[in-house]
Amino acid sequence: MKSTAESSSGMGMGSPAGSSPLASVGRTARLAAISAVTNYKPSNPPMNFMETPTQNLFCANVFHKREMKERLPKNVYKSVIKTIEEGTKLDPETADVVAAAMKDWAMEKGATHYAHVFYPLTGFTAEKHDSFFTPTGEGTAIAEFSGSQLIQGEPDGSSFPTGGIRQTFEARGYTIWDVTSPAYILENDNGTTLCIPTAFVSWTGEALDKKTPVLRSMQALNKHAQRILKLFGHSDGALVSSTAGPEQEYFLIDRNFFFARPDLINAGRTLFGAKPPKGQEFDDHYFGAIPERVLAFMFEVERELFKLGIPVKTRHNEVAPGQYEIAPIFESANIATDHQQMMMLTLRKVAEKYGMSCLTHEKPFAGVNGSGKHVNWSLGSKSQGNLLDPGDTPHENAQFLVFCAAVIRAVHKYQGLLRSVVASASNDHRLGANEAPPAIISIFLGDQLTDVFEQIKAGGANSSIPRGTLTVGVDTLPPLPKDAGDRNRTSPFAFTGNRFEFRAVGSNQSIAGPLVAMNTIVAESLDYCATKLEEATGGDPAKLNESLQKLLTQIVAEHGSIIFNGDGYSEAWHKEAAERGLLNLKTTADALPALKEPAVEELFKKYEVLSPRELESRLEIYLEQYCKSVQVEANLSLEIARTMIFPAVVRYQNELASTCANLKFLGYEFDTDTLDKITTLVKGLQDSSTALENILKSHSGTDLQAEAEFIRDTVIPAMDAIRVYADELENLVADDLWPLPTYQEMLFIR
Ligand code: ADP
Ligand code: MG
């Protein structure tokens, strides 16, 4: 744990030389933190945003098309664009030329190094930096960057999780340039680096990363979407790409509080903390005015993201105090995934500059709303536009209905898979907790589409409920076109006008896993639909309508039970979902085994997204991550309970006890209620700590699934038991002795 002196003086607000900062501000790290926070002054000068307006910064640090067009010979440029836009193979000769141009561009921007950036299965971003410079042997150095250096790198990736794909002695792993995701410059006060997004694979060509399966799944989706489009007479071959727009929720707290909480530092969430007297019950934070310091942070985040070509659009306060959201405009799934990773890094980096910590954990504060990352998903092509756009009269839009029905079928058929790709120890705190969608996967379609599909089921759709206009009853307010359906916050998978929004995704997660799952299951469904329709029409377009009607009716009959427009938080839904036979996989330990199911294995194998071995390795890694992160939390719980909370409590107990004894000696009456209560709770704190310690000691599992279940059933309840005593004590012990910044302080003081 960081000492108080460091954390407060680190902000440039230390006490006068010579005296201990503790002496001047209080007895605990917590009180020192409060003092530092209330004395916060920005250390960096304000940005001169008029000098370079933010809009002029867009893509300033990206080697994008415009830059390539200027710097590359025409034929090379064309070849690269063809790869990016049409998904064709890259011609290796072009790599040398691109590398040279990229290096010149990067060096003009001050770069001395290049880095292959990759996305290992930890869910984080990894980079290996190499210098451009090679010594000539004559006391000088020349800058070099060849096509092969651009295309391939070889980080010694032996420490990245591989889930048994590779033994540690088989350390070879390769990074391979992803031409479709543009290279960019990463700035630092002391230098800049050229960053090249790459895929990361083993010596045997197996995917060790999150990017490779995204690219493979996009390829599968394109292939089968093309077949459907062809049936509708569109055979221009324009690449069908899946698109994604993730909405990122996060918390900001002052860094001084962060450093006074070992649980936040090490686990990303608070393991203790009594409910504050004022929480979010007034809903006064949601979309409220953004605090000045936070707004300053957001402006800077947006400038940084703009430079990286990330089209951030929306910012607002979220439901909980101290919680915010940022959302970019949607992009191709692969690029959106890379950008999403950069966005999380940028949020953290800029927060530090403003003396804050950005918490992306799904549930940093128990009892307060958690954070998700809604992933908006669709598919489309340059020539056809968004394939999930229903238009004004969806009942007449047969092509849309096929794509939409394919999604319905996919989500119903692979609900377990969709649940498993959002499973993590941290997201378990959020899903099903009356603030986030339940662990039951269902689809919200809205009134208009539900009605159309009902009609289809009954034999044929002849009408669409009109959108209408919204009138407010005030003459000066213009009438508005009304959306075809209202929203439903409680649905894990909602149709929102022209896309689906997967809301169960956790705020700290890479969006790669959810996108791989959606792309692949929809590819499978489109394959199914295309095959049925191709067979039924036998190439005769005149038979399309009739075959379609049959297919859609059958899909709604078989898979319509996944559609639910009601309140997903309600008890009644849990009951009804069970009656409908929908899965309710409550925790990670319940959800991850879905990855082992034969149907899931077959799915990924058939569409060449993940081999059985690659899939198995993922299951192993995710189980291990679950176990490890809860174990860290359990150890932290013990440490904090024993070295921070217990000492504070006994000091207070001692004060109280001696007061009681003294008063009694002097013949006064003194109520010992508080002392009695504290004494009982201290005993509970000690006993529950010992119980957890014994549980942790006693168990050494070999089978990961059994271990995960043990953690779910035994370790987590034991941790929760300690917390109950600690949180009650927080409300009894003298404020000046309490060691941990409270919820109240972290969420409201800034
Ligand atoms: P809301 O709060 O209503 O859900 P936001 O504006 O915060 O909406 O976010 C909506 C997200 O959906 C944005 O990232 C937006 O770009 C994205 N989006 C819109 N159209 C598509 C599409 N066709 N495919 C994927 N994402 C989309
Ligand atoms: Mg949303």
Image (tube, rainbow, N blue to C red):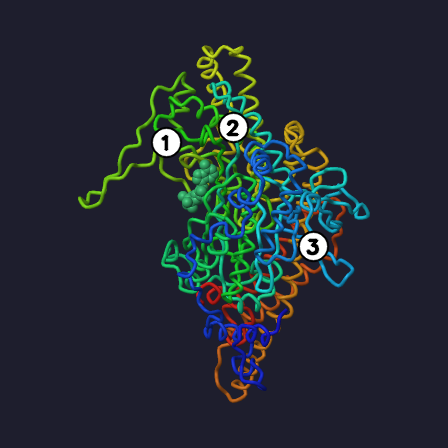
Q: Nearer the viewer, mark 1 or mark 3?
A: 3
**Mark 2 C-beta closer than 8 Å to ligand 1:** no
Q: How crowded is mark 2: few (under 14 residues within 10 Å), some or many (20 or more)?
A: some
The Cα–Cα distance between marks 1 and 3, rounded to whole angstroms, is 56 Å
Estimate the x, y position of residue 315 in percent, counting from the top left: 42, 52
Write down the residue under mark 1. Answer: 447
Residue 490, visible in the rendered structure: no
Q: Which residue sits furthest left?
A: 475
Q: Earlier in the sequence, mark 3 or mark 2?
A: 3
The type of residue carrying mark 1 is Asp
State ligand 1's quadrant: top left
Picture quarter with the C terminus: bottom left
Q: Dot 1: within a 10 Å radius of its alpha carbon, few (fewer than 14), some, or many (20 or more) residues?
A: some
- Mark 2 and mark 1: Cα distance apart in space: 33 Å
Q: How crowded is mark 3: few (under 14 residues within 10 Å), some or many (20 or more)?
A: some
Looking at the rendered structure, the kind of residue marked 2 is Ala
Q: Mark 3 points at which residue?
A: 130
Q: Position of residue 287 (x, y in %)?
A: 37, 54
Q: Measured along the vertical axis of the image, is residue 39 above or below residue 153?
A: below
Asked if disc 1 and disc 3 are in contact, CB closer than 8 Å, the reply is no
Residue sticking out furthest to the front: 138
x and y percent of residue 262 in the render?
Answer: 61, 65
Indicate the secondary structure of the residue bearing disc 1: helix
SS category of the residue bearing label 3: strand
User: Which one is earlier in the sequence, the residue at label 2 or at label 1?
Assistant: 2
Q: Mark 2 points at which residue?
A: 238
Quadrant housing residue 585: top right
Q: Are marks 3 and 2 in contact (CB under 8 Å)?
A: no
Quarter location, residue 400: top left
Q: How far apart are marks 3 and 2 (CA)?
A: 37 Å
